[in-house]
Amino acid sequence: MKKLNWKRIVGLSTAVFAVIVCVVWNNAQEISKSNAHKIMVFVPMTGKLASAGLSEGRGVEVVVDDWNKKGGLLGKKLEVVWEDTRADITEALTIYQRNNLSENKPLGIYSIVSSVAMNLKNFTEKDNIPHIAAVGAENFSKAPHAYALRNFNSANIVGKELIRYIKTTYPDRRIVYFYENSDHSISCKAAMEKEIDETMTVKVLDFDPTMNNFRDLIYKANPNNDEDIVIITGIGSYLGILIRQLREFGYTGLIMGDANLNIAGVHSYAEKAMNGVIILDYQQYDDNAYCKHVNEAFTKKYVEPLPDVGYYLAYQGIDTLLAFYKSKGTTNIPNLTEAMEGFIHDGCLGKVTVKNGELNYPLSFRTISE
């Protein structure tokens, strides 16, 4: 029987181990390099806000497709990673930790839903990860704020514009205001209160976003067709139920709100009740070549009717970030929020300007016709 050459075996084992370590290290480096060009989409893909999450996630997908067709960002391909937060804070943080994003930093995170975005921000700021959030919460733009960008017009602006429009256009109307008990609506309410004067009568009713039946609330409000104007702020498809039940109650008067009333799920639940609703909306230029391209890219990729404004917001928000990186020739930018101050980028929703950590878009009133 041949004697085993232990020296040779140990030598081979050491060599194999060295190769394995080398391969694992190289793979880790490749994963790290790849992860550095990933955009992670933290959106609800299930539950009541799924339609909004799907719409905005697809906006990120399409803009990444467009950049990759042009060679990617600074010569490197981009990748989209979807994560279903279910609009739940705990789930979002679990996803963050499961992916070990403190170590495996992505190029950026795109999120929606104020509570989720606010809690994620605590981690993205600490880990220096660019974080774009389509949320109405005013607090998202407060310090610490070195890597966070709010991709949504300020609730402060929305609240002021709604009241100023009523003062100018319907000066004799009373206001019945239904607002969701959320950061966005509370911020809108605060802004409205600053604009309301002693000549105006306002009835305010808050509601729980989990409600499916608003009839008792509507009965309590008892809006008058000829004398009142109803304002609704919140986020989620259930707003369509509120609008439909207002009409079923017999209210035929004016209903107003912000761009959240224009998401696909709201229209689905409201059905024909959306007809005549006045919305302070983002400008979608259907005749603009940029917008036509974004529309065509969506219908070609998903073979579905165009979604709501969230799709365009996500597209232009990420497009603005990538355009900024391209203009600087690097993605390694300390204090990104401050560096982007004053940056202007033309897109499908008009000219976006970065100011105080917010992407500001032009707004205009329009009446829904269905």
Image (spheres, helix red, strand yellow):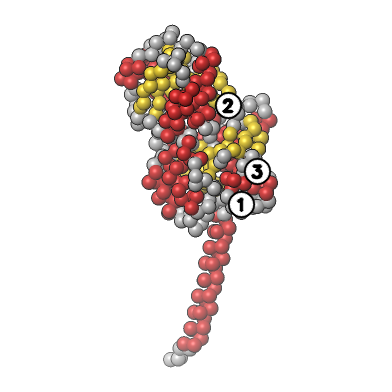
Which of pointers 3 and 1 indicates the residue nearer the eye?
1
Q: Residues within 10 Å of mark 3 (few under 14, many from 20)?
A: some
- Give me the residue at 43% from left, 45% from top: 119
In front of the other: 149 or 253: 149
Coordinates of residue 185 in the picture (x, y in percent): 43, 30
Name the residue type under label 2: Leu
The residue identified by callout 1 is: 333
Q: Residue at x 33, y 24 (%)?
A: 213
Check if mark 1's residue and mark 2's residue have beta carbons within 8 Å: no
The three-letter amino acid code for the residue at tag 3 is: Ala
Percent x, y of residue 1: 43, 91
Question: Residue placed at 47% from the left, 46% from the top?
Answer: 121
Q: Is residue 258 something one can see in this rendering? A: no
Q: How crowded is the residue under tag 2: few (<14 C-alpha within 10 Å), some, or many (20+)?
A: many
Marks 3/1 in contact by CB < 8 Å: the verdict is no
Q: Are marks 2 and 3 in contact (CB under 8 Å)?
A: no
Apparent side of residue 245 relative to residue 305 in the rendered image (left or right): left
* Front in this rendered view, residue 25 or 225: 225
Between marks 3 and 1, how big is the CA–CA gap?
13 Å
Q: Which residue is label 3 attached to?
A: 323
Residue under pointer 2: 363
SS label for mark 3: helix
